[in-house]
Amino acid sequence: MTIRDAAGDLRRMRPSVRALLGAALALLLAPAAPARAQDGGDWSACRAAIAAVEPGSGLPPGLLGAIALVEAGRASPSGRPEPWPWSWNAEGEGGTAPSKAAAVAAVAALQARGVRSIDVGCLQVNLLHHPDAFPGLEAAFDPATNARYAARFLNRLRAGSPDWGEAIGRYHSGEPERGAAYSRRVALARLGAAWGRGGAVPLPMMRGLAGLCAPGLQPALLIGGAAEARRFLRPGAGRQPPLPRNPRPRMACLRR
C-alpha cells in the first residue's frame, strides 16, 4: 500500500476542506446497521448473540460487534477476522479452545492454580472485576449471556462518562491514555474498512475532496499515524494497544 501525506495535520487544512472532511466523517461514523449472523457454527456464535442482544440495548448499533472483534477477533476460515467465543486472557496471555467445553476446562484449570483475573468469552468480561456477572463458567462462556452482561456494563460506563468514546475506553482500562487508544481501535473496527489495512479509513468521495489526490488515489484518514495504526489494528495485536505517538488524524492518499 502506498501512502502519500496529502495535507498534513487537519488543523492546517483549508477551512472548506475541513468542513468537507467533517461531513465525510459524519457519514462514516453514522450508526452502522447491525451485522447479520451468518451460518458458520462457532464462528458465527458471537455475532448471532450480539445481533439478538444489541437491538433495544441502548448501545450504538455495531458497538458490541466492534468490541468483540477487538477483544476476541481471530482470522476465520474465510480469511476475515471474526470474534471467537471460546477465548480467554489471563496474566497478559490470550488463549483459545476448539469448543466451549474445552474453554471451560482450561479456565477452570487456571482458577485451580490461583489465577483470578481472567477475561472470558465474546466480549472478554473479567471474572475478577465482575464477580457477580455469571453464576459459573458455563454461563460466562455462553455468547448471549456474555453479550448481555457486556451491554449492561457499557451502559453503566456511559452513565458515568461524558460520551461514548470515554465509556468505551473505560471498558478496557481506567488509565485515560490506554482507554483512549482502545476507544480509537474500537472505532476503527466499527468502521470495518481499517481492520488489518494499516489503519487507513477510506473517505467517501465528495465534491471538494476528490481534488486532494492525484488520479488513481483515494483520500483517506490515518488515525494515530501509519506506523502505530498498522500495529494497532492487526488481529493479533493483543490486549494492550500501543500508545500513538501522533494522536492527530492526518489525511493521506492511497492507491485504489
Image: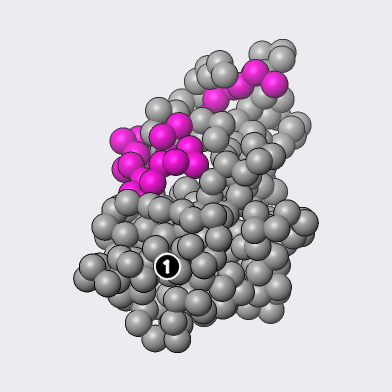
Quadrant containing the N terminus is top right
Identify the residue shown where x is 74% and y is 60%.
Answer: 37
Q: Quadrant of residue 63?
A: bottom right
Q: Which residue is mark 1?
A: 105
214 with respect to 243 (left or right): right
Left or right: residue 54 compared with residue 94? right
Residue 172 position within the rendered picture, expressed as x and y whole percent measured from the top left? 38, 61
Residue 249 part of the magenta segment = yes
Is any atom of residue 180 visible in this view?
Answer: no
Judge whether 151 appears above or below 4 on screen: below
Q: Which residues are magenta?
A: 230-256
Q: Quadrant of residue 167?
A: bottom left
- Residue in the picture at 71% in, 15% down: 216
Q: Amino acid at mark 1?
A: Ala
Magenta segment, prevailing SS (helix, strand or loop)? loop
* 128 in magenta: no
Is 88 situated above or below 59? Answer: above
Residue 152 seen in the figure: yes
Question: Which percent across, then down, holds residue 73?
Answer: 53, 50
